[in-house]
Image (cartoon, helix red, strand yellow):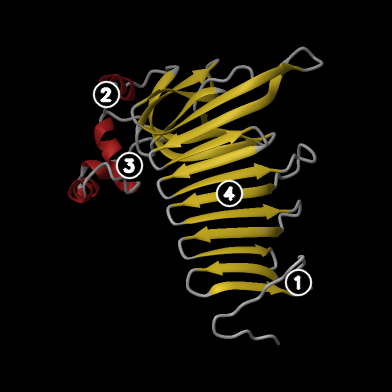
Amino acid sequence: MSEIGDIIKKIASSVDVVNTFPAIVTAHGVIEEDNKKKYTISVRKLITSNPEMEYLKLQAKLDSTYISEDLKNKVLSSDESNRKYNPIEYHDVRLKSVVNGIEEGIILVPRIGSWVLVSLIDNITAHTYVSQYSEVDRVILRLNNMKDTNGGQKKPEEFVDINLSAGSLQLKYGDSFHTQISKEQLTFDFLYPKEDSDSDQKKQSTLSFSKDKLQLNFMDKEAKEVFKSTFDSEKVVIQTGDEKKKVVLSSEKGINLISDTDINIKGKTVNIEGTEAINLN
């Protein structure tokens, strides 16, 4: 249960009303406000004299990788696990205390099934945030470039989000640029400016890299693909979104030029030479 285990045991066994209490993370959540994501969690508060057994019991129900199959079966079949406790569920628990309505800085997302300490803002149960973690699933770094509004208050003009987990790295620069990096692929997305605050933002172009392929796509404001190209170790394909105009350069099949409209070749001298044959239809 980590270094805060003794604190958790003491508070979980107490029936006194406190401003901070231990709980187990049961789910992740995201609240969308003004096209910005606010990350939250759901937790279960345990009121029991044996929090460790209740912890193992919940881990088993969550199908957690923290405990082995043998221990999971043992916990679920034990007499202790069949006792009735009084869990209390809290939803939309903030991952940090926010007093000015602007969530920035380092945001830690705890692992599902791990212990956290939850604190209350102004002792209001609807205003909860995580004040201590035992295990972290991912880290989000959010930086805001603030500007004054007419009312003298601050609001974000530009922002940078860095979302880091063991499997990927995501970078979001305001409303103009997103990128995602994993061990398999690197993707860049450039976005059209938002038409208004309530509209969904659409991709303008996407550049994607993997170990054996590079792909570039352009989209219109209706999210319709208008142009795309693909490069790999065997061929290069450049085509329109509807695939009616296409150029294919293949190491095995040569060069293919396809069009549903005119193909124009212009030059002072045009030479066409075939080593075996030339076919004109």
Contact between labelled residues 1 and 2, with CB atoms less than 8 Å apart: no
Q: Residue at x 24, y 36 (%)?
A: 53
In front: label 3 or label 1? 1
Q: Which mark is residue 58?
A: 3
Q: Which residue is mark 1?
A: 263
Amino acid type indicated by mark 1: Ile
10 Å crowding of disc 2: few (<14), some (14-19), many (20+): few
Q: Which mark is residue 77?
A: none
Quadrant of the rendering where the N terminus is positioned: top left
**What is the distance, in whole Å, between disc 4 and disc 3 at their CAs?**
43 Å
Mark 4 / mark 1, whichever is N-terminal: 4
Say which element carries label 4.
strand
Q: Is residue 242 above or below residue 131?
A: below
Mark 2 / mark 1, whichever is N-terminal: 2
Q: Residue at x 48, y 73 (%)?
A: 252
Amino acid type indicated by mark 4: Leu
Mark 2 / mark 4, whichever is N-terminal: 2
